[in-house]
Amino acid sequence: MRRGVSRREFLKLSGAGIAGATLLGGCKDLASGFKSASTAGPNTLVLTKGPDTSGTLQKAIDTFNKEDHPFTVKWEVASADTGLYFDKMRTQFQVGGGEADVIGADVIWPAQFAANEWIEDLSDRFTEEMQSDFLASTIETSMYQGKIYGVPWYSDAGLLYYRKDLLDKANFQPPKTWEEMLMQARKIQADEGLKYGFTFQGAEYEGGVCNQCEYIWNAGGDVLAEDDPSKVLIGEEGAVLGYKTAQDNVLSGVATVASATYKELESLTPFIQGDAVFNRNWPFGYSIATGGKAAGSSLKPEWVGVAHLPTTNPDDEGFACLGGWDFCINAFSDKKDEAWEFIQWMIRPEIQKTFAIDAGFLPPRKSLFEDKKLLKEQPVMELAKSSFASTRPRPSVNPFYSDMSLDMAQSFNDTIKGDVTPEEATAELDKKLSRIASAAENVFNVGE
Amino acid sequence: MSVASETGLRKRQQTGVVSGAWRSIRGEFTDPEKRTAYWMILPTLLVVLLIAAGPILYAIYLSFWRVLPNGQTFIWLDNYVTLFTDSGFWGAAINTVVFTVASVGLEFALGLTIAVVLNRGFVGQGAARAIAIVPWAFPTVVSGIMWRLMYTDQVGIFAYLADQLGLVTGPILANSTAVLLGAVVSDVWKTTPFVALLLLAGLQVIPGDVYEAARVDGATKWQQFTKVTMPLLKPAILVALLFRTLDAWRVYDLFWSMTDRQLDSLSVYTYKFVRISQLNLSVGNAAAVLVFLSSLAIAFGFIKLLGTRAQEA
Amino acid sequence: MNKGFKTPAHAIGFYTVVLIFAFLTLFPLLWVLKMSLVSDTELFASPPTFWPESVTLKSLTAGKCPLVGGIKFPCPENFQTVFIDPIFRAGLANTLVIAGITTIICLTIGSMAAYALARIEFFARRPVLSLVLAISFFPAVAIIAPLFLQFQKAGLINTYWAVIIPDVLFALPLTVYLLVAYFRELPEDLEDAAKVDGANIWQAFFRVTVPLSIPGIVTTGLLTFIYAWNEFLFANTLTLDQQAQPATVVIPQFATTYTTDYGAQAAAALVLTLPLVILVLFFQRKIVSGLTAGATKG
């Protein structure tokens, strides 16, 4: 049975391997994988950011590079999974900063990076006068201990998508409270035979935390005290009520319990396939839902409505969770002035407009929400104006936010699956967050 | 004989033993053949000591400290106390135990059945064997992602089938128990053929005349199986169980991808603490030490059962 | 044909069991293939379709895959997505380099150790064998944090070495054990003859044992290669970008911020696994005998 492999075959095999690696790599320089060395030239500024399928970012960089600047910009494509991207960035900083000069950073990152002195304090460059045109929440989330570390690039807000045609038919106005939404969804589901009343993102990930925060805020609660990030409020009445509302939405059967496994795409799919009445999602969903067959939607554009997220009590103030991305400058970079020049260029109103129209990256600039042409091109901006005006950042001012987020996501996910009661979940989470908050107080002097 | 002379004798014997040991140690290095043997194992030994022993000692050391971005303090066993009072740790431990017992049990039962059925020459045996190792060669992370998709409530084929057959109510992935079972099923898919092949190889070295003898003695098929096959197959079974149990106990890739980090095994739990959390590095190292010790204990238990055979492999 | 079946019914029953087993084994793989070929609309159809309805000759050739040099081959669209993605291509090349070097290192140092352990009676033989065996029971997560800190200091993060070094550690026990078993089966006469001719142990090892053991070394190498090809935990932790990260780390990233491209993930999974499937089918006898060596000779 020792039908052996001859030495020649063995050599052939290794030869094929080497040839394969070279072919596959194509332009890639395999030798670079053996050492950790910079590949960027002295006149190249490196931007890191996840992929952009619209191609707008690459086009903007090309435009910048064609203009007369003393340096060119190169985009290093980072992971599309924000959590993975964050882990890699943190690793990069821990091992000496990496190559990126400008970092496209999720709005929840600046405080964590700033606390470790990984990103540059921009207070002298990004003046208060410049800040004044940006949504307050986007500035707030870029601040750490009174200094600003990030420049808002584009923004997201949690919205309630609804089937305008079906609500009109049933003679309903978009719901103001969750209870109203349940009532409307039940009625429409029964009349039209729809499978889902409401879908949202309840999976154990950062998007779940956004949904969680909205439920809490819109029931009058909060995670941390606004004026004192060392004070945990998750065990208080408002937060518990928010948890209850979320659990009720699921227990009522209107929101499918599968929402506990949904991220953005999974929760949007039933809506655009015409199987759901309501969906909580970000503005990106609008162009898909109104994009017809090509975008995978079976809805007519005029059937898609956008409203402010409901609240628990009719007199509660309604908030939307702020998402989106900032520019930060790597503290280890030796091209900080160039980095700032590029950032200033990227946040020019006309560039932000291009991003809004071509990529659906909605601008954080208040003035652009009044721009007639832009509102016509991106109707969701008009529809979501009030939601953007009422955006709030997650409690990411805490430099241990990634620890908080792990615990928050798990607690919320367990609650909507029905594994724990809102009281138990919030009490448990209160303990965990208090431990983190006191660690933050000790390590970084966060708090009063 | 006096007591004094007795102790004197013992002493002389002891020095004899010591100098004998010394002579044999020196002999290890003066004998050119043995010296070469040490040179030959040196690289392997260095890899094992530097990359396994060094880091695990460092992990043990770290598990007695509280490590934070602003410094570290020695806290004795506090990290272990934190760990034992964390419900998440016990959840991960229970998941791991259930996963290990269920998947190894099923893989063994199915694998043995398949091995017994296939233990005969038949047309297409080569093809059957080739098919059997394809799932084994499929990267676990990737197969985890694919299985997750097959369990999703909207497009998942298995969710759809389970729903049609009335096996589940509600979405599989929203139910922690169902997700755990799902992980067991995908592991059974991936590794049963592997177990079957191991056992089949064990069956094929049992000489035919043993059965002949049993048949002459009037043993039924079932008696032949329990009295002849099983005892002779015992070493193969133990080796297969040892490797499968430890793989299942240390499971990481499958839980990471198939449960989308929503269900913790001990390894995933440890990983979240040491690499994702910024506060719990040292608690995570305590968990790492426990995973290490428990794996060691399992291996030790099996090797005791195996006797010295593993040593001689 | 009827190889010792008592009745045709026995044969039918037997082959039915075999076919069920084969079907259950292959079904998930066929499903992945289906996912990689159907349109996005069909991929998200609820309830799922059993037969790929949207697959036509046209859809199978809708894309253009650049495979070798500048030549492009018609292929399904998801495969085009995968093949034109520079990160995935780099990932495949990195996988090949990492798995290849891991295999070479393991075989080099593992075969020397195995030879000493199989042929020479020395005091440390048993303890070393036990130590190497213990490594195969070692949990990877137990050392990930210390390893990260060490590699960070040594500047190895995001290089091939960061993955190769732990891969070598975890593949070595298998290498050593299989080769010890293999060398023990080789007759010693030829080595002895070489030694009589004045060769020392190294020469006997390199000139006599290694050439005679090529089949065993290839089998062992294949198993090591497959292990390193599929490794994920270390690669995901210790590499950062296309400079060094292998394909297993890239595949989960076929996505945008809010959406996941499952079709492309399925296609990428098949592309990554295809070389292994070919290897496995080509060498299946050897791989199975290698895998089962421990169980039968144990």
Image: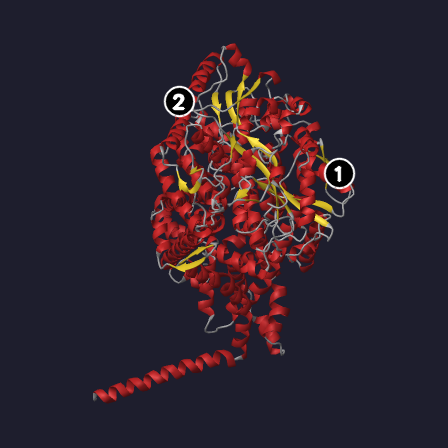
Estimate the spatial distance between the alpha carbons at disc 1 and disc 2, rounded to whole Å: 52 Å
Whichever of labels 1 and 2 marks the residue nearer the N terminus, that label is: 1
Numbered badge on residue A252: 2
Q: Are marks 1 and 2 in contact (CB under 8 Å)?
A: no
User: How far across and how far down the image is residue B150, in percent?
Assistant: 51, 33
Circle 1 chain: A
| Position in image of residue C122 (x %, y %) | 48, 74
Please name the residue that numbered disc 1 is placed on: A63
Left or right: residue C3 versus residue C204 is left
Residue A263 vs residue C200, the one in the foreground: A263
Q: Label 1, secondary structure: give it.
A: helix
> What residue is drawn where x is 45% and y is 61%?
B58
C281 relative to A238, above or below? below
Q: The C terminus of chain C is located in which quarter?
A: bottom left
- Camera-near label (1 vs 2) is 1
The amino acid sitting under disc 2 is: Ser
